[in-house]
Image (cartoon, helix red, strand yellow):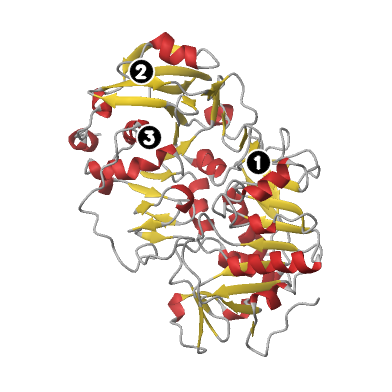
Amino acid sequence: MSKIKRNGNKPQILSARQAVDYIEDNDVVAVSGAGGGIVDPYALINALHDRYVETQSPKNLTLWHSTGLGDRGEKGMSPLALDGLVKRVIGGHWGQSPKLAQMASDNKIEAYNFPQGIMAQLARTAAAGQPGILSKVGLGTFIDPRIEGGKLNEVTKEELIQVMNVGVQEYLYYPVVPMNVCLIRATTADTEGYASMEGEITYIDVLQLAQAVHNNGGTVILQVKRVVKAGTLHPKSVKIPGFLVDAIVVESNQEQLYNGSDRFFSGDYIADDSDVNILPLDQRKVVARRALMEVKPGYVGNVGVGIADGIGNVAREEGVSDLFTLTVETGPVGGTTAQGIFFGATVNARAIMDMPAQFDFYDGGGLDVAFLSFAELDENGDVNVHKFNGKIMGTGGFVNIVAGSKKVVLCGTLRAGKLLTTIANGKITIDQEGKFEKMIKKVESVTFSAKQAALQGQEVIYITERAVFKLLDGKVVLTEIAPGMDLQKDIIDQMGFVPVVSKDLKEMDACIFKEEKMNIYDEFIGG
């Protein structure tokens, strides 16, 4: 079917099913959205699902999504996990939509994992008519074509990424992938297609996707909550110019997240955070407390989803949260991010960046510190977060963030699988040891390259609930042990390799393991 024809200066207003009827076999379809419903064009995704179930058309699509989208179940990209509908997926993160990830694991589709930031920037690059991006992001990791080239399974054969040298510097070259269709979302559109995002939590890369598809002669389909009279939106509120939009689909029940809407998330209200929610003293809080000690006043950092996401809350408990700034890769600057599948939804953000711009800051070395989680750590200091235990999760922004940060703090428990601890009176006790090793001899696949970090002169720290390690001279060195832990029984015997034990091994500060506040304000501001 041919491209949607605009009515003069106006896009067509269609039902979701009518709009997705314009998607053809073999199209490259870009889909916006992040996390638990952020900017998710779910009505369009569901309509495409329904069309294929009813008609077995369109076939052999390539899906492009730069972030993780879904509830780790049925929502997000999972409705598109249909045999024959999808030929190839290029995704920044896969774990939020496990049905597509399972198709990749089963070798039913071609599957690539590009770094989230590279994907967001590639949309902008495509819009500008440029051929691709040269970047150091991904060197030495599974993204590197000398290793796996970002390919996630056996049926994925085509090499999309290349190694290039510019002078004496080595880079990865990521080519633009031309897009035929994009399914994107905003809050309000006027009848000429000019759209604002006042009710959305972030902007992510919707503008860049619309520009890329339009400039490629493709079809831009926009889901919104409402349509208003032409020319009535304030020009500074317009995020998507109307001439980019071919079809508008009204979804009046559109919510900010899968569990509803909250105008605190869209920045319309500022939450009273004078009463701090005190986190329970458990292994997650221990890790967050120790991680906070790697921050200095004035730092700009990134905090990822997972065990480290309590750092902001601990900082508020200690009265130091206003002394540094945490950011999230989807665009928020400052504030407090939600946890779990709703990660990226931020309360009291100070600013919201376009996602490509946020990653420009990261890739250019703007981050003083990054707090991220690890799934596996090996004796070389390499970390795997994207593919383990037979599951494809994807990297999200991890590869960009660790590549550009001056200090990298990787957080996790020493073991996984029903680990039970008691934390009280300045020490930690292991009540039930975790079933699975996380500190292993060799990671299955490299998401973080310790060798590349060393080449870049980065400081790398690995924090667990019972020990702290550093990457020093290419080796994982145990530098701190928690009070109450036995070095051999509780640390070394629970690892798949023997770390170097520092000659200056010391105890982690006992205040980390006490119910009361750590009272670190004076020490914090003292540097």
Residue placed under numbered mark 1 in the picture:
171
Q: Residue at x 45, y 40 (%)?
A: 306
Q: Is residue 428 above or below residue 199?
A: above
Which quarter of the figure has residue 242? bottom right
Residue 458 visible in image: yes
Tag 3 or tag 2, which sits nearer the N-term?
A: 3
Q: Image quadrant for the C terminus?
A: top left
Residue 162 point in image, percent of width and height: 73, 42
The secondary structure type at the circle numbered 2 is strand
Q: Is residue 508 left or right of residue 72?
A: left
Q: Amino acid at mark 3?
A: Arg
Residue 269 point in image, percent of width and height: 31, 67
Q: Is residue 178 left or right of residue 195?
A: right
The secondary structure type at the circle numbered 1 is strand
The numbered dot on residue 42 is none
Q: Image quadrant for the N terminus?
A: bottom right
Tag 1 or tag 3, which sits nearer the N-term?
A: 1
Q: Amino acid at mark 2?
A: Ile
Residue placed under numbered mark 2 in the picture:
481
Q: Residue at x 24, y 42 (%)?
A: 317
The numbered dot on residue 284 is 3
Q: Is residue 307 above or below residue 118?
A: above
Within-10-Å neighbours for mark 1: few <14, some 14–19, many 20+ = some
Q: Residue at x 44, y 40 (%)?
A: 370
Tell which of 63 and 451 is nearer to you.
63
Q: Are marks 3 and 1 in contact (CB under 8 Å)?
A: no
